[in-house]
Amino acid sequence: MSQDGEKRKVAVRAAGLVQDGMAVGIGTGSTSRMFIEELGARVKREGLRIRCVASSNASHELGASLGLEVVTLNELPELDIYIDGADEVGPGLALIKGGGGALLREKIVASAATRFVVIVDSSKVVPQLGKFPLPVEVIKMAKPLVEGKLTKLGYNPVQRKHVGGSDYLTDENNFILDCHCDTIPDPVKTAAEIRAIVGVVEHGLFLHMGSLALVATPEGVRELNP
Ligand SMILES: O=C[C@H](O)[C@H](O)[C@H](O)COP(=O)(O)O
């Protein structure tokens, strides 16, 4: 089965977890996009009454265009469930997120939810995190400082740019430094070291946050627990 086929399968399963009356966090990225489409289809078909909070402007707009009631975290600060993709899923459901640049809002929305369900295709499950570059969101003026400190720590940061070479900016108007670590043997240590740098807004390591991962495989959807 193609990667998109796997993503669709897991998106359908995740949409099935949403129940009438729930407050739902909707994630960002290509897998979340499929989940939002499937959720929109369920709302239309079954008349589910749900309210959603999105982890990016793009997902907010997509959800609203599909008939979901999408509100802000101010209006709905407590969520029953947050469903989102990931770039890597390691042991204990340690995650790298932020390939789509939404890590900051994703971490905020995830932390507002009772359950965080991660939805991925089988290529995302790894024995150790780090092959996927770890995104670090930084305040613009602090970029040279943070870049220097990350380099000293051996994290090989590269500023994210658009294809034409212009600076990539997050929804919060910050820069992203993608850290080419190759391996992250101790994610707790790495998270602490990066968080300690002044000017870092957030990093893409999501540790002890996931409640369940739904992993699409050619044989079906597998569940992974922390
Ligand atoms: O910032 C983006 C998010 O963390 C995404 O959830 C992550 O990059 C996975 O995206 P995709 O489902 O497109 O692989």
Image (cartoon, rainbow, N blue to C red):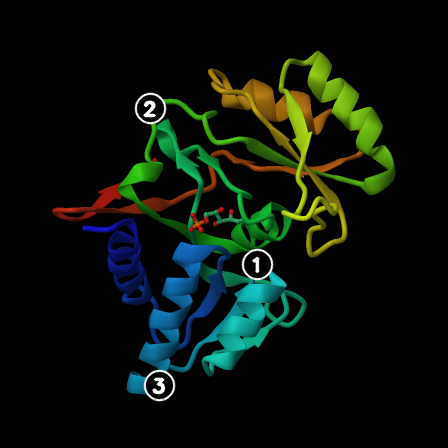
Residues 91 and 61: in front is 61
Q: Quadrant of the C terminus?
A: top left
In x, y percent, where is residue 158?
66, 29
Q: Is residue 81 left or right of residue 53?
A: left
Alpha carbon separation for disc pair 1 and 3: 22 Å
The residue shown at (70%, 47%) is 168
In this picture, is 38 found above or below 48?
above
Alpha carbon separation for disc pair 1 and 2: 27 Å
The residue beneath circle 1 is: 55
Query: Which amino acid, mark 3?
Result: Lys
What label does residue 15 carry, if any? Answer: none
SS category of the residue bearing label 3: helix
The residue shown at (34%, 29%) is 126
Which is more N-terminal, label 2 or label 1?
Answer: 1
What label does residue 44 carry, if any? Answer: 3
The residue beneath circle 2 is: 127
Q: Is residue 1 left or right of residue 131?
A: left
In x, y percent, where is residue 26?
48, 62
Query: Which amino acid, mark 2?
Result: Pro
